Amino acid sequence: MELRHLRYFCVVAEELNLTRAAERLHMAQPPLTRQIKQLEAELGTQLFRRSSRGLTLTPTGQFFHEHALQVLEKVDTTVAATRRMARSKRELFGIGFVPSLFYGQLPLLVRGLRQKDNVELTLVELTTVQQIQALKAGRIDIGFGRLLIDDPEVEQEVLFEEPMVAALPVGHPLEGSQPSMAELAEYPLILFPATPRPSLADIVLGMFRRRGLKVHIAQEANEMQTALGLVASDLGITLVPEQVRRLQRDGISYVYLAEKHITTPIICSRRRGEAVSDTMRAANEILAVLVENRRSGKYP
């Protein structure tokens, strides 16, 4: 299978008409028809239903279309970034991160690397699972997440453990206290991210389950900002990493937990066995300073 097959398929999926698709692709219809049939034969499934009224995508065709678009988008992004790097003679360095880390020391790492004249940074918001995939595909060079994932091609380092805090609506009965997990379990829980999983949502659920506590999930949100908005609307409470306290938001009150050992790790992921570039060496040096500052209490 080649990229052109994906491009041909996506155009046909958009047009649902081989004649119009062939015109868009500046090719004759018979060769396009053959390419689509070859693709279906290679996949071992029918991607289109054919009738006198035209084409429609089958369920497997819809699935393939969604993922083919993602592949092509990644390819186009990579090509564009490579061309920018070639024009500027700068090294491309990709950083993947989960959103909650951007309220702590991660911006300081980015700022430090941006001072290097020969580096072009790309920042990509990804879950830890997505970071592992992106590292193996070469889309990023380093990732920062919260899950330990066993993969022979990726090495992970726990930088430090970060306390969890409860985000409550202003005026909540637990505001101003240091509640236990058992007390928090009495209130509806806003969980995030809803997808993809596993994620911070599973870490939070595990904190309750290990203590034999059942929780009522009032709602799931894909974005942390949405989850906090739901908390501010008094629909429930949520647990967030300590760094998120820096996000001052109306209607939200943050409280520390009675159990001080309830934490979530900050994990750095890199490709295993790869030669250390100058930029990676600089990133590691900046990270070492930031981690030491965190452990010594310089940064909350």
Image: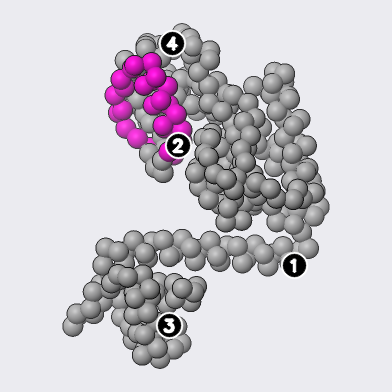
Whole-percent x and y of residue 219? 32, 32
Q: Which residues are drawn in magenta?
A: 198-227
Secondary element under disc 2, as helix, strand or loop, is loop
Numbered circle sitting on residue 199: 2
Earlier sequence position, callout 4 versus callout 1? 1
Numbered circle sitting on residue 97: none
Whole-percent x and y of residue 292? 73, 25
Residue at which label 3 appears: 24
Characterize the local packing of mark 2: few (<14), some (14-19) or many (20 or more) Cα atoms within 10 angstroms: some
In this picture, residue 72 sits left or right of residue 195: right
Characterize the local packing of mark 3: few (<14), some (14-19) or many (20 or more) Cα atoms within 10 angstroms: few
Q: Residue at x 29, y 24 (%)?
A: 216
Earlier sequence position, callout 3 versus callout 4? 3
Residue at which label 4 appears: 179
Q: Nearer the viewer, mark 3 or mark 2?
A: 2
Mark 1–mark 2 CB contact (< 8 Å): no
Mark 4–mark 2 CB contact (< 8 Å): no
Q: Nearer the viewer, mark 1 or mark 2?
A: 2
Q: Amino acid at mark 3?
A: Arg
Q: Residue at x 45, y 83 (%)?
A: 25
Earlier sequence position, callout 4 versus callout 2? 4
Residue at which label 1 appears: 87
Secondary element under disc 3, as helix, strand or loop, is helix
Q: Amino acid at mark 1?
A: Arg
Characterize the local packing of mark 1: few (<14), some (14-19) or many (20 or more) Cα atoms within 10 angstroms: few
Earlier sequence position, callout 3 versus callout 1? 3
In this picture, residue 289 sits left or right of residue 53: right
Disc 4 versus disc 1: distance between alpha carbons?
Answer: 56 Å
Q: Residue at x 72, y 30 (%)?
A: 290
Q: Amino acid at mark 2?
A: Ser
Disc 3 versus disc 1: distance between alpha carbons?
Answer: 30 Å
Whole-percent x and y of residue 99? 53, 38
